[in-house]
């Protein structure tokens, strides 16, 4: 029974990783950029959630999960601003400049928040109040169920959006070849901004779900979460929507099971060890296709 | 040619000695306080760190984000050695430092051989993962002091020893990188496939550069451990690796002079900004973004600053004048 509970635990944190990994994988797929600031968008989202609940929703009768609306709006806006100010001017520069800029943006957001709100964590009351569900005698919290369900729905919607709509197809085309996409009338600028916006909106959802699982916000919370989510995206095969979700869930489950049955101290080492193992056996990730380099 | 080279060496050695003399005089005359000297010792450590990362990032052209991992291995090796085997004094210090370098180098080979098959961002994320694994393992085991860290490492804060150690390290790395082996590494950076077709053993030279880099990171770690006396694994997390990378990138990837200058500046400036401590990291990160936006190749790009070139320039200018004067 304990095993089953830990599995569900893993699925819950794995779903959050998956949502964050979706943002990484979309941005990487299209802009070939490890957006190190993505974790900080989660952090900003968490602060938005916390402050919306503390300052607004606590005074009204509205349910706390309404905080999702400002959270998504803020995250999306910040994602777009970062893309426009920091990444767009560097589109044709070497990859390492982009990577360093991303690290710079990440440090900037962390330290600005640290300056404004201090280093200590801010906590919130729990977001989902309903009683735990009875599931074959085991108690499962509503947060777990909501997290897993929301992730599943959003992944399917995102996959449909990319495969079926004009905008989604434009994104796929842009990720294949900027020049050719431009030639068939796709605005590369707009597509990139849209990718960042969607990724950041998903990060907004992820941050509310994260806060509902671990009810606090602090300036440094984003960096480790971000790195793990990127790890998940790489494990699943970067640039692929199903890959990000698969990677996220695997990572979450491995982490939860290690914490419960082996050692809570070693869980990070085992998660990163998994990444190294996968990359050495299949460098393109679990679902990725191998590409030969052409001369 | 060889005479010219000898002259260059003599000039450089002379300049290093003059710099050392100036610093010593300033210390002896009391212009430099103890605090200033502690910053200067940090500069020595960071110069070794930045130049060692420059070997991988600048010369080999591979991004690694796990440099702090090698540094921590060096620091712990030196710390455990100094505490376990009690050879005091400078001999013990130097043996410990060498041992730290060798240990980090061995880890460099172990990590490098599998990891260097990957490229670009994949390599970056895997080295980051390795750095974190090393950190977690150090915190997990007991012989390393666990999460409390290692205390009571014998202090070694002799500035002249650290200064010359840094000079020797930088010189060694620079001469290896300008040697035949170094040119092979540069060829890999420029074009891997072309390098391979001209008979360069890619795996060997990639591992070679990576190991060299790890070796000197280990030495820097050992210097750090002896300088500060207390080490904890949490210091060597990925933020430390980012810090070192920032030094290399701002100085110009592939330029040893750039790495030395930016390591010096980036160590001294944050210390002088201490009164604005709250804004220090904000300014630092803004600076980083600005440099990338307006001068993405870094301060010096891939150029090196040679004193002989300056002499040559003055000579040609002087020569022109004399010609004009003659006519």
Image (cartoon, rainbow, N blue to C red):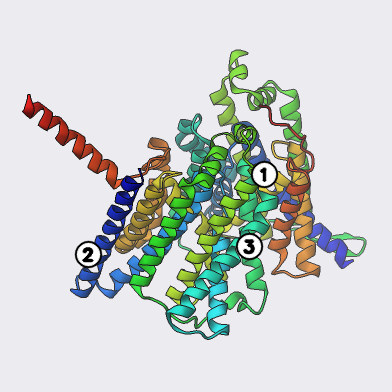
The answer to whether residue A226 is seen in the rendering is no
Label 2 is found on which chain of the structure? B
- What separation in Å lies between label 1 and label 3 (alpha carbons)? 20 Å
Residue under circle 1?
Answer: B118
- What separation in Å lies between label 2 and label 3 (alpha carbons)? 38 Å
Q: Residue drawn at (32%, 57%), measured in percent from left and top? A: B269
Q: Nearer the viewer, residue A136 or B271?
A: B271
Residue under circle 3?
Answer: B106
Q: Secondary structure at mark 2?
A: helix
Q: Nearer the viewer, residue A147 or B194?
A: B194
Q: Residues within 10 Å of mark 2 (few under 14, many from 20)?
A: few
Residue under circle 2?
Answer: B22
Position of B112 compared to B170: left or right? right
Q: Are marks 2 and 1 on the same chain?
A: yes
Q: Residue drawn at (48%, 63%), measured in percent from left and top? A: A119
Q: Nearer the viewer, residue B298 or A247?
A: B298
- Label 2 or label 1, whichever lies nearer to me, is 2
Number of numbered discs visible in the structure rendering? 3
């Amino acid at each position: 029974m304990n095993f089953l509970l830990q599995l569900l635990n893993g699925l819950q944190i794995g779903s959050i990783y998956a949502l964050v990994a979706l943002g990484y994988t979309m941005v990487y797929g299209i802009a070939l950029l490890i957006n190190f600031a993505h974790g900080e968008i989660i952090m900003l989202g968490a602060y938005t959630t916390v402050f919306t609940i503390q300052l607004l929703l606590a005074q009204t009768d509205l349910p706390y999960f309404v905080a999702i609306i400002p959270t998504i709006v803020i995250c999306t806006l910040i994602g777009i601003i970062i893309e426009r100010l920091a990444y767009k001017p560097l589109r044709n520069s070497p990859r390492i400049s982009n990577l360093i800029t991303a690290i710079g943006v990440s440090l900037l957001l962390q330290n600005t928040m640290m300056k404004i709100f201090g280093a200590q964590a801010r906590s919130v009351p729990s977001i989902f109040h309903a009683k735990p569900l009875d599931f074959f005698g085991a108690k499962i919290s509503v947060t777990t169920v909501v997290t897993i369900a929301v992730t599943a729905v959003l992944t399917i919607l995102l996959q449909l959006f990319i495969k079926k709509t004009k905008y989604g197809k434009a994104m796929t085309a842009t990720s294949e070849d900027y020049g050719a996409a431009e030639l068939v009338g796709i605005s590369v600028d707009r597509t990139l901004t849209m990718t960042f916006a969607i990724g950041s909106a998903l990060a907004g959802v992820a941050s509310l779900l994260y806060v509902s699982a671990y009810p606090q916000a602090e300036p440094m919370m984003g960096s480790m979460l971000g790195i793990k989510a990127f790890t998940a995206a790489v494990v699943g095969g970067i640039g692929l929507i199903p890959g990000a979700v698969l990677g996220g869930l695997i990572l979450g489950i491995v982490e939860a099971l290690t914490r419960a049955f082996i050692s809570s101290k070693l869980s990070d080492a085992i998660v990163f060890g998994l990444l190294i193992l996968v990359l050495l056996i299949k460098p393109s990730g679990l679902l990725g296709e191998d590409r030969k380099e052409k001369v | 040619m060889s005479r010219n080279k000898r002259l260059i060496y003599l000039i450089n050695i002379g300049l290093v000695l003059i710099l050392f003399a100036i610093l010593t005089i300033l210390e002896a005359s009391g212009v430099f306080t103890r605090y200033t000297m502690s910053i200067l010792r940090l500069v020595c450590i960071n110069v070794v760190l930045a130049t060692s990362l420059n070997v991988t990032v600048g010369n080999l052209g591979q991004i690694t984000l796990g440099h702090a991992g090698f540094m921590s291995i060096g620091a712990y090796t030196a710390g455990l050695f100094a505490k376990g085997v009690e050879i005091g004094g400078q001999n013990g210090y130097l043996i410990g430092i060498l041992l730290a370098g060798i240990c980090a180098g061995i880890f460099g080979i172990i990590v490098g051989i599998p990891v260097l098959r990957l490229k670009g961002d994949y390599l970056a994320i895997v080295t980051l993962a390795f750095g974190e694994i090393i950190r977690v393992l150090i915190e997990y085991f007991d012989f390393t002091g666990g999460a409390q860290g290692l205390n009571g490492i014998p202090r070694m804060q002799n500035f002249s020893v650290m200064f010359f150690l840094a000079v020797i390290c930088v010189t060694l790395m620079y001469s290896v990188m300008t040697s035949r082996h170094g040119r092979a590494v540069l060829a890999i950076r420029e074009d891997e496939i072309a390098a391979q077709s001209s008979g360069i053993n890619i795996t060997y030279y990639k591992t070679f550069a990576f190991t060299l880099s790890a070796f000197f990171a280990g030495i820097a770690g050992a210097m750090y451990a002896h300088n500060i006396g207390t080490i904890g694994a949490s210091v060597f997390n990925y933020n430390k690796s980012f810090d070192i990378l920032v030094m290399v990138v701002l100085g110009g990837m592939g330029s040893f002079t750039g790495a030395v200058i930016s390591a010096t500046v980036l160590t001294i400036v944050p210390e002088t900004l201490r009164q604005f401590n709250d804004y220090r990291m904000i300014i630092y990160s803004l600076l980083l973004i600005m440099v990338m936006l307006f001068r993405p190749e870094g301060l010096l790009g891939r150029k090196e600053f040679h004193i002989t070139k300056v002499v040559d320039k003055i000579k040609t200018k002087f020569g022109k004048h004399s010609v004009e004067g003659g006519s």
